[in-house]
Image (spheres, rainbow, N blue to C red):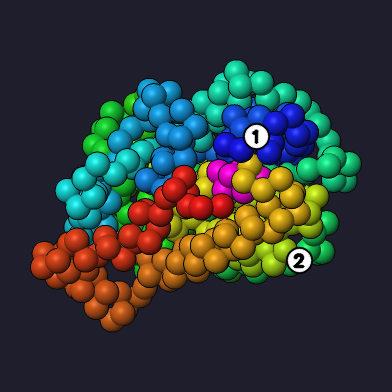
Amino acid sequence: MTGALNGRPVVIVGGGVAGLTAALALRQRGADATVLERAPALAEVGAGLQLSPNAMRVLDALGLVPALDAVSLPSRAVRLRDAQGADVVRLDLARHRPGARFRFIHRARLIEVLEQAARQAGVRIHLAQDIAAPPDAPLLIGADGLHSRIRAALNGREVPFFTGQTAWRAVIADGDQTPEAQVFMGPGRHLVSYPLAGGLRNIVAVLETRDWQDEGWSRPDDPVNLRAAFAGFRGPVPAWLARVDRVHVWGLFRHPVASRWQDGRMAILGDAAHPTLPFMAQGACMAIEDAWTLAACLDEAPDQTAALARCETLRIPRATRIVAAANDNARNYHLTGPKRLAAHAALRIGGKVAPGAILSRFDWIYDFDPVAEKP
């Protein structure tokens, strides 16, 4: 730490994962950080998240791992299965990436850990703040999500592209705490599930459909619709879906990675900068990476304009590559006909012959260390 941030006022719009992580990282370097959050409380919203080693390195550097371990579960494997429940391939994270930290956590628990640490560090958090326009602050960070007003101020109006996919999120009570994520792949649809601390299970189910849905997590739906969409799935899926009594649905949209992340006074990060489809489990992880890199760049260079430009240069290529990888997975999970049979056969053979090779395709994601990166 150079002291370049000591006492510097920073206003962060948005009290989600990106905003709270940025506030904590900036405050630990001496900044006078204030968070403005639109919601009246940092309440129980969203559902499960997967935290991979790239993000865990940041959370460790921020001193949060003991608190996170108490409210999360380890992830040991990713198990790909077909719609009938038959195994396609099991990717053993614990065996092929020994010592790497993968965790399952409810978003609300992550927010609680971040909020407590930020407040204890001296971050001011103001709730119920209706931000009609970007506040007038010498350093303004937009962590205000998909419909970011600060992104719009930097980039103008943009129209996202509806992917033709609808997603449901639900959390159920479940005693099975097997530490693995299970992905059930069927023609035109897939379902992901993994355990959460406290005897819970997270479910995300994605369906290709022409029916347009609003973007965002807040629209409730009838669980009957979810059960009908995945009625042909077998294995544990029917029992899981039978226990869903509350579910939310939203449309999946492709957004371009923002072409402009900063202007010397304002900067954006997280979903405000690079919304991504939920097919690489990297949305929250990228927000955490962004927050660390932003704080490190501002701490390294007293010239704020140069520091923000450096952060933008470091983050855009990686964000662009991860967003593209998530787009590719959206296609791979939903293959039909001969392509689906061939892909599943290749995965089964690869899992037996060289399982490590399948996992190595993602080394560039998981081995990345934002803490070691020179700002």
Residue annotated with mark 1: 3
Q: Residue furthest left?
A: 353
Residue 274, placed above or below residue 138: below
Among numbered discs 1 and 2, the one appearing first in the sequence: 1
Instruction: Identify the residue under disc 2.
Output: 158
* Amino acid type of the residue that numbered disc 2 sits on in the rendered structure: Glu
Work out whether residue 138 can be spotted. yes
The answer to whether the residues at label 1 and label 2 have Cβ atoms under 8 Å apart is: no
Q: Secondary structure at mark 1?
A: loop
**In the figure, is residue 111 to the left or right of 205?**
right
83 displayed left or right of 36: left
Q: Residue furthest front?
A: 2
Mark 1 belongs to which amino acid? Gly
**Residue 190 percent across, percent down from the top left:** 39, 59
- For the point 63% across and 55% down, the residue is 311
Closest to the observer, 84 or 349: 349
Q: Is residue 193 above or below residue 212?
A: above
Q: Decide which of 270, 338 is in the foreground and name it.
A: 270
Q: Quadrant of residue 220?
A: top right
- Tell me the quadrant of the picture where the N terminus can be found: top right
Q: Is residue 95 above or below residue 74?
A: below
> Is residue 93 located in the magenta-colored stretch of the structure?
no
**Magenta-drawn segment:** 291-298
Q: Residue at x 38, y 38 (%)?
A: 104
Look at the numbered disc 2 and give the secondary structure of its residue. Answer: loop
**Left or right of residue 3: residue 281:** left
Residue at horizontal 44 percent and vertical 70 percent from the top = 328
